[in-house]
Amino acid sequence: MTKADWHPDTALVHGGSLRSQWGETSEAMFVTQGFVYDSAEQAEARFLNLDPGFQYSRFANPTVTMFEERMALLEGAPVARATATGMAAVTAAILCQASAGDHIVAARALFGSCRYIVEDLAPRFGISCTLVDGRNLDEWRAAVRPNTRVLFFESPTNPTLEVVDIAAVADIAHAAGARLVVDNVFATALYQKPLALGADVVAYSATKHIDGQGRCMGGVVLCGEEFLEKYLQVFLRQTGPTMSPFNAWVMLKALETFSLRVARQTENATKIAAFLEGHPKIEQVIYPGSPSHPQADVCKKQMSGGSTMLAIEVKGGRDGAFAAMNGLEIIKISNNLGDAKSLVTHPSTTTHQRFSEEVRQELGIRQGLLRLSVGLEHADDLVADLARALGD
């Protein structure tokens, strides 16, 4: 039985384990900047990549390597590289393969910082961008140019939970000689496998469900060996968005309970979505695990679970949304997500506030919209908290 045959629960406990001469049970934390060589010849061989050992923690570190290998096993990816934050992962995944004169096609429904990368930052370096409705395959096809190198989207999207057909967009990318990068944060690797659906690169904010307990920042890029060697490795080494050994150790320990946490959070999210559907104070509930989701057929095709996130539109616009948030006791107001604690945010005034009202309306981010990240509390308590806040 090889590691590739392991179920996710097993891989999340044992994957990538690298023990020192002391044979420790828990993964060791190698808090070091550099490494000592037995000889000048060995140092030379390390820097020529002829010796497989470590050189410098900006390049690689044993604790970080364990986290990377565990994530690769979970994702079913050939390789993974960890970064300091999720945005560092997205930035590296896109910019490492693009040069002046190239073109990016991206879904317009993106997390604010992700949209900044493709819409504001990349053009400063001569990389043009076209934004499309990610749900519309004809728009993807029409946007592709001879110089298109990257197609990028998140699915489900932040915060409106639109779902993009990964396999279909992958086909469009490959027909054009481009690569598809998918941000898979909301679905998690447990419920959606973009690489198996045709994506070339997958990015995560490990800050979210992977840590899942509000402690550390981190990101991960997963890809094939060729992409790593040709584009990603040198970009990460030279620009230095390195994950610290401490954060990697925290992530390793968090992965041991990852599947248990996400399963419970998904169960809670499903119950909350059912409670809110048809509630007199709620205009709309968007949840990928619900038959009422606008792209329910795509959800069913590429996701094995609804995951932990809901979009809720409260009647009464901003005032109604703020009143509901301020009436909550258990669910906390925070712009993070994927946490053990249930968290709610108002995207129009937080995560997507830099956009104009016109752009927010185009994206479906109306003033009454709330993004709810469901935690590990008892579902009955969460439902009661929402009921109180909504005036039941």
Image (tube, rainbow, N blue to C red):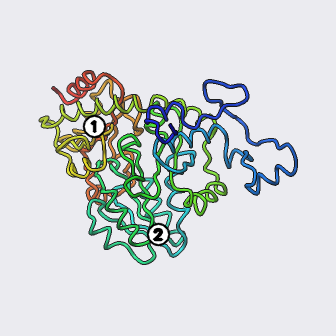
Q: Residue at x 31, y 61 (%)?
A: 168
Instruction: Locate residue 99, reporting x and y percent.
Output: 55, 70
For marks 2 and 1, give the CA distance. Answer: 42 Å
Instruction: Name the quadrant of the C terminus.
Output: top left
Q: Would you say 67 lies left or right of 75 here?
A: right
Task: Identify which amino acid the numbered label 2 is placed on.
Answer: Arg
Task: Identify which amino acid the numbered label 1 is placed on.
Answer: Phe
Q: Is residue 378 above or below residue 115?
A: above
Q: Nearer the viewer, residue 347 or 105?
A: 105
Q: Would you say 26 lies left or right of 302 here?
A: right
Which label sits in the foreground, 2 or 1? Answer: 2
Instruction: Locate residue 244, reporting x and y percent.
Output: 63, 40
Instruction: Locate residue 317, reporting x and y percent.
Output: 21, 44
Q: Residues within 10 Å of mark 2 (few under 14, many from 20)?
A: many
Looking at this view, name the residue that lies furthest to the front: 1
Q: Residue at x 31, y 33 (%)?
A: 266
Q: Would you say 280 lies left or right of 305 here?
A: left
Instruction: Locate residue 196, reporting x and y percent.
Output: 40, 52
For marks 2 and 1 on the same chain, the one whose residue lies earlier in the sequence: 2
Q: Residue at x 64, y 56 (%)?
A: 239
Q: Quadrant of residue 140?
A: bottom left
Q: Nearer the viewer, residue 18 or 390?
A: 18
Q: Is residue 245 above or below residue 347?
A: above
**Residue for badge 2:** 149
Q: Is residue 271 above or below residue 2?
A: above
Q: Secondary structure at mark 2?
A: strand
Looking at this view, name the residue that lies furthest to the bottom: 146
